Image: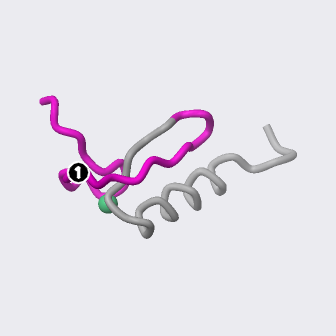
Amino acid sequence: MAERTCAACDCALDGDSIKVTIGGKTVEVCCEECAQKLNEAAASAATPGRG
Ligand SMILES: [Zn+2]
């Protein structure tokens, strides 16, 4: 289970992965689209001013 997978779509990363930092955590995704998905999810999860 040493294989790295995309943090967004869970597909196998082929060495050519993209690193994105979400909430201080660095994760790897397969493409820019997945990177954007994570960014949007993080943005909606962390609503400013509430909580
Ligand atoms: Zn992906």
Ligand 1 falls in quadrant: bottom left
In this orientation, which residue lies closer to the viewer: 31 or 37?
31
Amino acid at the residue labelled 1:
Leu
Q: Tell me residue 18's x, y (percent).
A: 40, 53
- Say if the magenta span includes residue 23: yes
Give how far across and how far down residue 2 sits, in percent: 16, 30
Q: Is residue 24 left or right of residue 29?
A: right
Residue at x 61%, y 34% (from the top left corner): 24
Q: Position of residue 25 (x, y in %)?
A: 53, 34
Q: Residue at x 50, y 55 (%)?
A: 38
Q: Report if the beta carbon of the residue with label 1 is closer than 8 angstroms to ligand 1.
A: no
In the displayed image of the protein, which residue is found farthest to the top? 2
User: In the picture provided, is 15 more to the left or to the right than 36?
Assistant: left
Residue at the left extreme? Answer: 1
Q: Main secondary structure of the magenta part?
A: loop
Q: Check the picture and name the quadrant holding the C terminus.
A: top right
Q: Which residue is mark 1?
A: 13
Secondary structure of the residue carrying numbered label 1: loop
Provide residue 16's location: percent of width, then percent of height.
28, 55
Q: Which residues are magenta?
A: 1-25
- Residue at image x 23%, y 49%? 15
Location of the N terminus (image quadrant): top left
The answer to which image quadrant residue 8 occupies is bottom left
